[in-house]
Structure formats: C-alpha cells, structure tokens
Amino acid sequence: GCSSSASRTQNIQITKNAKYLLPILKMMQRSFARYYSLFPIIFLNLFPLLIRLANGQVLPGGLQTLSGYDVEDGTDPVCWLGKSNKIGNNVGHVLLEETPWSNELVKGFVLMGGLQLLSTCPEGNTLEGFYPKEFTEDGEIMRTGRYYDYKVKGSITMDSLNGENIVSDEGPMIAVQIILCSTSHVSFCTPFIHEQANARLAAQNATVPTTIGDSHGGSHIHSPTVFIEMDGNKKGPQEFEVNVPTKVNFPGNFFAVAGIQLFTSSPSTNENVPKYKFIQTDGESSMQAHYKYDIANALPKRVINYEKPPTILGVSKAFEVLSWCLICIAVCAIMFLLWQTTRHFDNQILRLSQGPFLIIFLLSSITASINTFLYNPKK
C-alpha cells in the first residue's frame, strides 16, 4: 500500500512538471522542424555562392559575367578561353575530350576539354560593334540583299592573355565577324551559334550549301570573316578598327553581335621556329597554338530589323489607255449636262435652282476631269 501511494505521488509530480515542460518541448519541436529544412538550402546554395563571390562572379543568372552583355544593362564584352594539348604531348594520350575546332585561323586546332567563360575579359581587351551609318545617321530601313558596313573596333593586350604571342596559320592574325541571330530561334547570341547549328544539322543529315547572307540552320547569319594583322610579339595594347561588310537575304528581327577570335602560343623550345607560326610537321601539328580566345559584344541597340526592298510595280500600257478613255467619257458626260443647262437656261426650273451657279459648277468639273491625266501613274 505504501509503494502504490508513493508511485501515485510520483506520477502526480511528473504530471505537474510535464504541464510546464510540454509547451517548451512543443516550441522546440516547431523551431527544429522550421529551421531543419533550411540546412540543405544553406549547404547547397550559400557555400557555392560564397565560392562564386570569392572568384569574382556574380549572383546566378545569365552567363555569370560581371558586366558583359549577358547581364542587365551590361555593355562590356564577354570572353571565352579554350586550350589545346600542351606542346609535345600526343593528342591521343590525353584523357580530356577532344573537339576538332573548325576555324579559319588555325586549321588543325583541337580543343581539349571545354570552353571556360571568364567572369570579365582580361584587362586591356575590349570590343565594340556599331550599326551601319545608313541606319544610325540616315535613318534608313535595313534592306535584305544589300551589303552594309558594320564598324568593329577594340584592343588586344597580350600582357593580360595566356600565352606569349598571337598566332595563326598565316602569321599574327585575328578574325572579326558580325553575327546576326534570329530572335525567333535563338534565346541568346554567342560566337558559338555557328558551331551549334552545324553540329545540329550534321546530326540530322540536313546540311545544305549556303551563300553569303543565307540563314545557317534557320538560326543565324554571319558575315564573311575579316582578318586583321597584329604585332605578334607586342606586349602593350594594340587597337584595331575595321568595317565588316554584312548581307542578309531574308527579312526578320536579329540580335546583332560583333565577335573576334584569336589564338596565342605557349613558349616554344625550338628557336628555329617563328613564334607567330602554327607549324605542321609530318601531318601532325606541334600545337604551338595553345590558347583560343573568343570575344563578343552586343551592338548598342541589340535588335535590328531587316525588311525586303519595296516592290515598285510598273503601269501597263493597257491600263494607261483605259484611264484616258474613262477621262474622255467623264468629260463628255459633263459637257452634255453643260449643253443642256445652257439650252434650257430660261426655264423656270433652272432659274429656281440657281442656273448660273450650276453652269460654274459644271465648268469646274470639266476642268478637273481633264486635269486628272496629271495623276496618271507611270510606275
């Protein structure tokens, strides 16, 4: 009996304590349940964000550049960096993915791995594109089937680029192009839209020959490549300015981008090989062109509209004769009315209906009808 009484007293005491502890436990449970769901978010989002900020990148969105044309109000160029295998390495022994990169500067260039998007372009490397003066100054509507000169200017500074010299198959050259991406097919225009379209068409076995101004894969049009010779060994900034003739063969709205491509070399151990030359030996490249830079910037207005030239139709001889006949018939009808009016001028009805005014009206009608030949169209 004593043990059961003590047990009841203990249960009562526990119940009293639970009365005060239960709200605290429930509050702790709610807080844990609320904030527990935040831990994955913190670990999965906050830490990568801090890493991106530490690397000089911006918040997620666009292409992750700081002030390139991919971000809101961005006006700076966007730069990409690619690499080949190192000099002397056998391409077949490299584990990175190999991508033969078709271009007009270094024919045998093989991209190893992927392209790296830089948060900002290397210091001293700038690029600007401008619409033709017929559009900006004269206010003309851009017409299809006609060449327009787009001005591209910028600067290249080897001091801030990887590699020692600017190289190509023909010496220290860079390639300049204007790229017009169709706004109905392309969400964002980059210098690689041409490679993407070619890969898609090749996969579909749908490649067709095109001429200058034609659409490539329905997505874009690019100008012929303009080459600019640079000083391959100069370390300071090298400025350039060139007009790029561009033609569009079909109407539409286009996102306009100016782009340049250049290759730089790694140090060469062969003193007899010019540093500015990409050397081919026994069918294999020495891979002196080690780095590949692509720089692009949107034109100020971003989107430009091309329309077909106005169609001017000629007037046939038959229609011209018909118009003369109609004029003669109209004049004859009015002259008949004038004759009848003057013949019955003394009639009481004409006096009541202001006969003199009616005569003046008919004479004016005859004059106007005869002069309608002045409106006879010639074209």
Image (cartoon, helix red, strand yellow):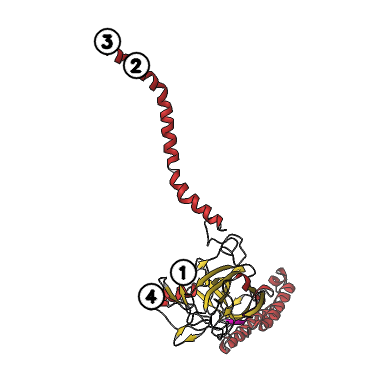
Relative to 372, residue 7 above or below = above
- Residue assigned mark 2: 12
Instruction: Specify which label sits upstream in the sequence, 1 or 4.
Output: 1
- Check disc 3: other Cα within 10 Å, few if <14, some if 14-19, many if 20+: few
Q: Which of 152 and 4 is in front in this view?
A: 4
- Could you tell me how far apart the alpha carbons at marks 1 and 4 are, in whole angstroms? 20 Å
Q: Distance between the residues labelled 2 and 4?
A: 80 Å
- Residue 197: x %, y % from top left: 45, 74
Identify the residue shown where x is 29% and y is 11%.
5
Q: Which mark's residue is nearer the viewer, 3 or 1?
A: 3
* Residue 342 in picture, x, y percent from top left: 71, 79
Q: What residue type is labelled 1?
A: Gly
Q: Residue at x 55, y 65 (%)?
A: 118
Q: Point out the frontmost of discs 1 and 4.
A: 1
Residue under label 1? 114
Q: Is residue 82 left or right of residue 229?
A: left
Residue that badge 3 annotates: 2
Residue at disc 3, secondary structure: helix
Q: Nearer the viewer, residue 54 or 309?
A: 54
Q: Earlier in the sequence, mark 3 or mark 1?
A: 3
Camera-nearest label, 3 or 4: 3
Residue that label 4 marks: 203
Query: What separation in Å lies between label 3 and label 4 (alpha carbons)?
Result: 91 Å
- Do the numbered discs 3 and 4 sit on residues whose CB atoms are within 8 Å? no
**Highlighted magenta segment, given as a residue range:** 226-233
Label 1 sits on a secondary structure element that is: loop
Element class at badge 4: helix
**Left or right placement of residue 230 versus residue 26 in this view:** right
Which quadrant is the C terminus positioned in? bottom right
Answer few, some or many: residues within 10 Å of disc 4's Cα (few below 14, many 20 plus, some between 14 and 19). Answer: few
The alpha-carbon separation of the residues under discs 2 and 3 comes to: 15 Å
